[in-house]
Image: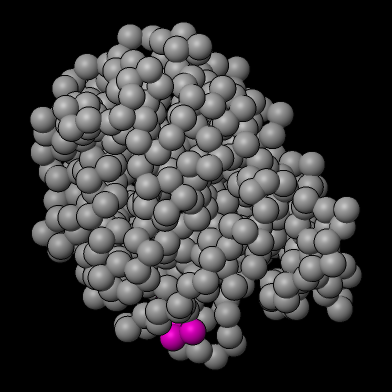
Amino acid sequence: MDRPYRNETESLCPVCLKRIRATRVFQGDEVFLVKECGDHGPFRTVIWRGEPPMAEWRRPKEPVRPEVCYGAVDAGCPFDCGLCAAHEQLPCSVLIEVTDRCNLHCAVCFADSGRGETEDPPLARISWLLERAMAAAGPCNLQLSGGEPTLRDDLPDIVDAARRIGYSFIQVNTNGLRLATDIGYGRWLRAAGLSSVFLQFDGVEDEIYRLLRGRALLDLKLQAVRNCGEAGLGVVLVPTLVKSVNTGSVGAIVRQALQLAPTVRGIHFQPVSYFGRFPEQRGDEGRFTLPELMRSLEEQTGGLVRVTDFSPPGCEHALCSFHATYMHSAGGRLRPIGAGKGDGCCSADPGAGGVRKTVETVSRRWSLPSEAPRFFRPPLPAENLCCDVSGPNTIPGEGPLDLDLFLNEIAAGSFTISAMAFQDAENLDLERLRGCCISVVSPDGMLVPFCAYNLTGREGRGLYRRRSGPGQ
């Protein structure tokens, strides 16, 4: 039955990128973003499918304006990012691309990198950009990205420079090839101060990697995790989800991740978005929404994780992501922590204090503790990884949670499952964009919300990417 419910917002025309009015239209158990450009006609894109309902998932959030703004409000959102004074969230993470080079040519790539030889920005320039970001965002989380950042032999020097500037949690976004084949490189990064590895990991079958990355990579991915564990680096697995390719593999990814704990600290799913380089499938049939992912995780793990475990974020807009934090045991059981209460990688306090708490929480959960054992769990059959969580203080067959069990679980470490639904020109919602807490440090030193930085119109025009050359 259709619901007579509409939300007004703003978006962009996916052709000319002009700002236009948009409406969230609730129809049955689906929600669509509907908009019309006077020059290019109407557009309609699904943004939410099924349970949990969007109306129940959303939550109120007070805006917090950035204190240091490099962008002046002139043309209006999203054309004045810097950040500007109209933005409604402080950054909890900043990302900087340290190279455009890559050793893969993937079918999906946010940055559309590896198209040719380019000059890497020198360390001095990167240090200036990091200092500029620090002045505006404070000591937030830092992700070094690309291209493939491990192609830089001086990446440890970049990590060291970031530490000296004041970043306490530093993560590298990587396909893992060099970490798999050069064990000394991971140790070098850890010694320089790297906190965590954000590892591209799309599934547990080589056919998935052939389709998305152009070659069989599973053995290399697993070796990269092992080498990171030996080096003392925590790993977060990052699957890019493409319908008909690997959306049926989310449960298998969870099972594999648990076998690789405690080195693997969690999983961060990213449904494919239509910017950069992507499969030519822009219609609604290619969309994989957050509620679909939550339900798939419950179904494909047989209830090991449940939809009710997941919470909306406390930092970015509620429609952008979900997360759950667990304690896990050697038997493969997962016990949710703070399910449904907003406990996760982002604090519910959106101000400066909340950002600091977010940085501390992410550092604690995504880094590998120095006392963590350097071993991997033996493979567990799927049926042993499914459990029935019968209440908030029980583990099946073990009764109420006692102190000894709790301490044992703490020693084993926490495990997080999260997802981020990035926006593209088709489904861009400016209300969501103004609440973004992930900023890209552009080559000219501006802080641009991730989805705005990567946004590309149907005719190939971008708002921000490659305004300045990568070597500047």
* Count of numbered tags: 0
Answer with the quarter of the image where residue 140 lies: bottom left
Please state which of residues 288 and 444 is positioned toward the viewer in this rendering. 288
User: What residue do we see at 16% from left, 36% from top?
Assistant: 369
- Residue at left offset 83%, top offset 61%: 3
Q: Position of residue 319 (x, y in %)?
A: 58, 59
Can you say whether 167 is above or below 184 in the image?
A: below
Which quadrant, please, contains the C terminus?
Answer: bottom left
Q: Give how far across and how far down residue 74 sits, in percent.
A: 54, 91
For residue 24, side relative to residue 211 (left or right): right
Tell me what residue is drawn at x 58 percent, y 63 percent: 58
The prevailing secondary structure element of the residues shown in magenta is loop
State the residue in front, 76 or 292.
292
* Relative vertical location of residue 194 with respect to residue 76 in this rendering, above or below: above
What colour scheme has been applied to the protein in the rendered image?
one colour
Point out the stretch of residues depicted in magenta.
82-86
Instruction: Residue lying at the far bottom in this picture: please name it.
Output: 74
Q: Is residue 122 above or below residue 102?
A: below
Task: Say which quarter of the image contains residue 410.
Answer: top left
- Magenta stretch contains residue 107: no
